Image (cartoon, helix red, strand yellow):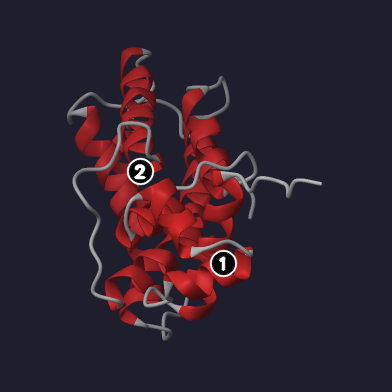
Amino acid sequence: MRPKKISDQDILQMVRDCMISEGGSVSTQYIADQLGVSQATLFKRFGSKSKLLQSAILLPSKTSKAKEMLDILQQGPTEEPVRIQLQRLCMRMLRFFDDVLPCFASLHAAGLRFEGTLPENAPPILARQYLTTWVETLQQQGRIRTHAHPESIALTIIGAMQHRPLRIHLIRDNHMTQTDEEYVSSIVEVLWHGLSDSTKQTEPKEKP
């Protein structure tokens, strides 16, 4: 009986697990042993250790935090109050960064860098594009101000949601006083003051 061929998805999921448990300096031999394959198989599929780890970090999974974030962005704004949508969206983004940044931290600690530029379908690239379109749609609908470029607003939101996990996983700042939910609520409060049209009725907040 021929052994079952292991898929790229299975390999990359194991690589992610190994990076989180062992760090970015984990050897390809260790990964291969966990998978029951040879190092040659890994290099044949992905070319180099750096590309293998990069592919694992950007793993497209049907159940990943990346998919949860991208799905809500791709569907565009709904009829719900913008403030409530923004609260939910920011929470999804925070969870995505909390999931992926430990892998980036492991890669950084091992002295490894991504080779070349990220592919166009990488979650960080798609998130920026989808969020920019999301903001632009709201501006066209007259539901938020048009005083700033939509991409600038998108990058501001991404930066705010990225910074807290970055401090936790890369800088090891574990002395912040807010919960994730409190942090997101505070950031949305600040963002909304800049995005909302003060001449219109105040939108309701989402309950914690």
Give the quarter of the image for residue 174: bottom left
Look at 58% across and 61% down and name the residue there.
Answer: 37
Give the Cα distance between marks 2 and 1: 20 Å
Q: As drawn, which residue projects farthest toward the bottom?
A: 175
Q: In which quadrant is the C terminus drawn?
A: bottom right
Would you say residue 175 is visible in this rendering? yes
Relative to 132, is 27 above or below? below
Who is closer to the viewer here, 118 or 53?
A: 53
Who is closer to the viewer here, 62 or 133?
A: 62
The numbered mark at residue 123 is none
Q: Looking at the image, is mark 2 or mark 1 nearer the viewer?
A: 1
Q: Is residue 141 left or right of residue 35?
A: left
Residue topped by disc 2: 124
* Label 1: how many Cα within 10 Å (few below 14, some 14–19, many 20+): some
Q: Is residue 186 left or right of residue 87?
A: left
Q: As drawn, which residue projects farthest toward the top?
A: 141
Classify mark 1: helix, strand or loop. Answer: helix
Look at 30% across and 78% down and name the residue there.
Answer: 109
Q: Is residue 110 left or right of residue 88?
A: left
Residue 25 locus on image (x, y percent): 37, 77
Classify mark 2: helix, strand or loop. Answer: helix
* Label 2: how many Cα within 10 Å (few below 14, some 14–19, many 20+): some
Residue 146 locus on image (x, y percent): 22, 23
The numbered mark at residue 17 is 1
Tell me the kind of residue under disc 1: Asp
Would you say residue 184 is visible in this rendering? no
